[in-house]
Amino acid sequence: MGMIELLFGNLFGGGRNVIRETAEVFRVNAEAQAGRDATYNQAALKQFASEFAHPRKGWFDQFIDGLNRVPRPAMALGVLGLLVMAMVDPIWFASRMQGIALVPEPLWWLLGAIVSFYFGARHQAKGQDFQRSIAATMAHAPEVTRNIGALQALEAGADAPSADNPALNAWRRSHDG
């Protein structure tokens, strides 16, 4: 048995890979991690699917679902309505604002916290989607740069493929006069 064969037999023999096992001490095995991630995602999706497996038919469930959709549009339309009323009937608007001025400061803090938590989750989800779209756009930057360079070369008349074509160059010389 040769020395190299003995060395490789000790490193990779017996169905083991000592190098891989040693490397996994310092770095996660990407394939095993992908398997764990897939299992986790499947379990999460199964849990979400089980929540909606039985359609809700009761009036209370439908009422609560509808109620959950009200706050965001109500706040937006309410603010727009106040702006319109400030222009249409300033006296009415001013009297309402005097009433709001009597609201104690701790109640404003509580309202701010509620609205922040309500919109915060949506803002975070939209922000993550935005970051993903930015990353996807940036991944296309090298391709776009190459395309712009090719277009600029075409515009300048330096057609790169034809520069290396002797037959085309000879034809151009014969027809240019």
Image (cartoon, grey):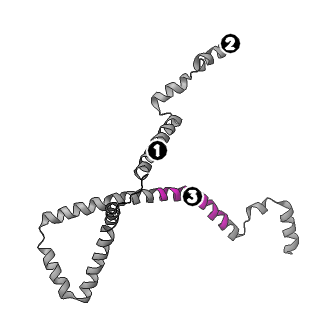
Q: Residue at x 62, y 19 (%)?
A: 8
Magenta segment, which residues? 132-152
Q: Disc 1 marks which residue?
A: 41
Q: Disc 2 marks which residue?
A: 2
Q: Main secondary structure of the magenta part?
A: helix
Asked whether 147 falls inside the magenta stretch, the response is yes
Q: CA distance from mark 1 to mark 2?
A: 48 Å
Q: How many tags in the picture?
A: 3
Amino acid bearing label 3: His
Mark 2 residue crowding within 10 angstroms, few (<14) / some (14–19) / many (20+): few
Q: Secondary structure at mark 3?
A: loop
Amino acid bearing label 1: Asn
- In percent of width and height, residue 20 lies at 54, 27
**Label 3 vs 1, first from the N-terminus:** 1
Residues 101 and 144: in front is 101
Q: CA distance from mark 3 to mark 2?
A: 51 Å
